[in-house]
Amino acid sequence: MKVLIIGGGGREHAIATSVAKSKHVDKIYCAPGNAGIGQIAECVNIGVMEFDKLVQFAKDKGIDFTIVGPDDPLVAGAVDAFEAAGLTAFGPRKNAAIIEGSKAFSKDLMKKYFIPTAGYETFTTAEDAIDYLASCEFPIVLKADGLALGKGVLICNSYEEAKEGVRTLMLDKQFGHAGDRIVVEEFMTGREVSVLCYCDGNTIVPMTSAQDHKRAKDGDQGLNTGGMGTFSPSPFYTEEVDEFCRKHIYQPTIDAMKTEGREFVGILFCGLMLTENGPKVLEYNARFGDPEAQVVLPRMKNDIIEVMQACIDHKLDTIDLQFEDNAAVCVVLASDGYPEHYDKGFVIDGLDEVAKKEGYYVFHAGTKLTEQGIVTNGGRVLGVTAKGATLKEARANAYEATKLVTFENKYMRNDIGKAIDEA
Ligand code: AMP
Ligand code: GLY
């Protein structure tokens, strides 16, 4: 089977690594890919939003199965474009990917179907939003309705800050049209957990849990990023929590989407807050998380193509999804200055040292192959993942491995997995 993966980050490298292990796959292409993906797949210079070119490429090469990694193409209808050409693609169609593409849609869905989440109001004018804020308690959370690279969420501690936030999102349009509408949401406290689930439209099967670290700096300080590191499983995601979520969140969500005529096939990522009143949904994503995929997929025992094909065939109930009884930690190596200003183009050394060790992975995010070798080419450069028998062992292994990889402006958080000590 020939597989095409759309995307070029650490998530897609993790997906490609799993696909490469599938007994059904002979050849992998990745558009656009990156230097690491290029070691196991043929990278093709087509952008993730160039649907016509991607479909034409898939036809020309006789691709049997396409996997769409990132949110932008999913929300814009990449899967629909492939299906219209008679091709098989894994991921939700446009009318289902809206669960990530519009926060107002997802909040209204949860409200209508009694899925636990924070209370909220939506606004289409800054004036109305500011009027409403005058009656709110603080902190409060402002969210741009549309996609904003995970950065369209503002936590505001006072009325003044919230007013400024509304201006940033709705008037200055920091995130473009994503801020045409905003959600104003109650602030929740608790532990955050990410649970990624395979879905076939009717059946939803959660994978092992993970926890991300979204802020740039140690101690959860600094700006929000795409994610600076992850660990899996989360010790806070107990069997009791899992049982509650299956009953009150996962199945109701997939059922709700079906009832709305928006059958969800693909990966549903549930961002959860474990509050003192029980688990509540922070957000949905319509894809694997990045860097959640980098700790979840290496622990999955199944053949990924068999699971994805079962989703497309509406036969997920025939799959016995299994994960290794161990743990994994991923530490992101970034370019100093990320997520704001940073330099790139620095040569990366030591990659092979890590990759040759059993149970260790270096997932490439922003890298490029040049005449000088592999160089940094983005804010998040690499994800160094290590497994261990326990979370603590995995964390020690991952941090040990980060020492082997060097480049000029290397930056990482030193407290990924700190929560493990509080479990
Ligand atoms: P989101 O993109 O919706 O997941 O939001 C990004 C981050 O903002 C989350 O991972 C949380 O840390 C935080 N956040 C979002 N919504 C809330 C909320 N209602 N209460 C507290 N924190 C929140
Ligand atoms: N790591 C969070 C995300 O992928 O949205």
Image (tube, rainbow, N blue to C red):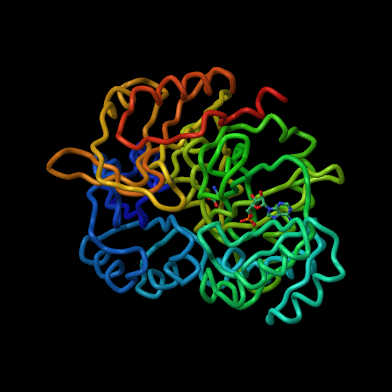
Q: At x 48% / y 38%, what residue is drawn? A: 297
- Residue appearing at x 58%, y 19% in the figure: 392
74 or 380, which lies in front? Answer: 380
For this rendering, which residue is in front, 383 or 241? Answer: 383
x, y percent for residue 149: 50, 59
Residue 395 at x, y percent in the picture? 53, 23
Report the quarter where the C terminus lies: top right
Residue 105 seen in this snapshot: no
Number of labels in the image equals 0
Name the residue located 29 percent from the left edge and 43 percent from the top edge.
Answer: 376
Quarter where residue 201 is shown: bottom right
Q: In the displayed structure, does residue 221 sit left or right of residue 397?
A: right
Q: Along the horizontal axis of the image, is 378 left or right of 421? A: left
Above or below — where is 281 with respect to 303? below
Is 327 rendered above or below residue 254?
above
Q: Position of residue 44 (x, y in %)?
A: 23, 57
Residue 400, x across and y down, in percent:
43, 19
Left or right relative to 138: residue 10 = left
Residue at 51 percent across and 35 percent down: it is 295
Looking at this view, name the residue that lies furthest to the front.
160
Residue 151 seen by the camera: yes
373, 251: nearer the viewer: 373
Question: Is 91 left or right of 246, judged from the image as shown?
Answer: left
- 317 or 332, which lies in front? 332
Above or below — where is 75 with respect to 412?
Answer: below
